[in-house]
Image (cartoon, rainbow, N blue to C red):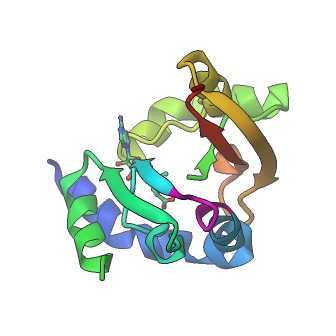
């Protein structure tokens, strides 16, 4: 784990604060509050979704590969995802920025078509709303807020 991983985790909440108040926090509240049953959150980061889980959640499992993020997440205890743009011009910018972003944002991919990837993995994507992360750099602005489940 390099020094940048520690710095990135320590600054993450500060970096995203204005994005949270400009709309991302509202999306979290609306989406995470609908979760129920056994929930798997992939890439929990610093635990920004935690305050929004409701009583319908029976178990919550959070995956997070970065140790500094896990430490912050543990302190907080007690997706939403930014995606590939639909606009081809912005998507090309995302492709160009990807090699830089993946290093600076410590493994974060700015050009992935996440809903399509979730579908390709065999999940039913029941709902996908698109928005933008206001106050974020243009190449990480496209946002999806959605719900997917495994076909029974
Ligand atoms: C953009 S951050 C979002 C964090 C959090 N979900 C939030 O809404 O604030 C993406 C997170 O996914 C984690 N991550 C990256 N690659 C991953 C992988 N292959 N599996 C699970 N998590 C991963 C990163 O370490 C990072 O904490």
Residue 103, picture quadrant? top left
Task: Name the residue at 39% across, 67% down.
Answer: 47
Q: Quadrant of residue 24?
A: bottom right
Which residue is the extreme one toward the bottom?
A: 78
Image coordinates for residue 84, horizontal then vertical, percent: 68, 33
Image spot of residue 67 (x, y percent): 18, 55
Q: Which residue is drawn at 66% across and 55% down?
A: 137
Locate residue 80, reporting x and y percent.
60, 52
Q: Report the predominant secondary structure element of the magenta stretch.
A: loop
Tell which of 66 and 57 is nearer to you. Answer: 57
Quarter holding the C terminus is top right
The front one of 84 and 27 is 27
Q: Is residue 113 visible?
A: no
Q: Is residue 108 above or below residue 67?
A: above
Q: How many marks?
A: 0
- Quick check: 30 left or right of 71? right
Furthest toward the left, the residue is 1
Does residue 145 belong to the magenta stretch? no
Write the start and end of the magenta stretch as one range.
Answer: 31-36
Vertical arrangement, residue 116 with respect to residue 148, above or below:
above
Residue 33 location, quadrant: bottom right
- The location of residue 2, given as percent across then percent down, is 17, 49
């Amino acid at each position: 784990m390099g020094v940048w991983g520690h710095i990135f985790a320590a600054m993450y909440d500060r970096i995203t604060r204005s994005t949270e108040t400009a709309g991302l926090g509202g999306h979290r509240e609306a989406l995470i509050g609908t979760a129920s049953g056994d929930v798997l959150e992939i890439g929990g980061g610093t635990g920004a979704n935690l305050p929004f889980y409701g009583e319908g959640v029976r178990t919550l499992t959070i995956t997070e590969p970065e140790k500094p993020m896990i430490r912050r997440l543990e302190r907080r205890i007690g997706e939403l995802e930014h995606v590939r743009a639909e606009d081809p011009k912005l998507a090309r910018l995302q492709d160009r920025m990807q090699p830089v972003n993946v290093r600076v944002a410590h493994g974060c991919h700015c050009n992935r078509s996440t809903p399509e990837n979730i579908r390709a993995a065999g999940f039913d994507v029941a709902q996908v709303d698109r928005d933008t992360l206001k106050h974020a750099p243009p190449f990480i602005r496209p946002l999806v807020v959605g719900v997917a489940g495994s076909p029974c």
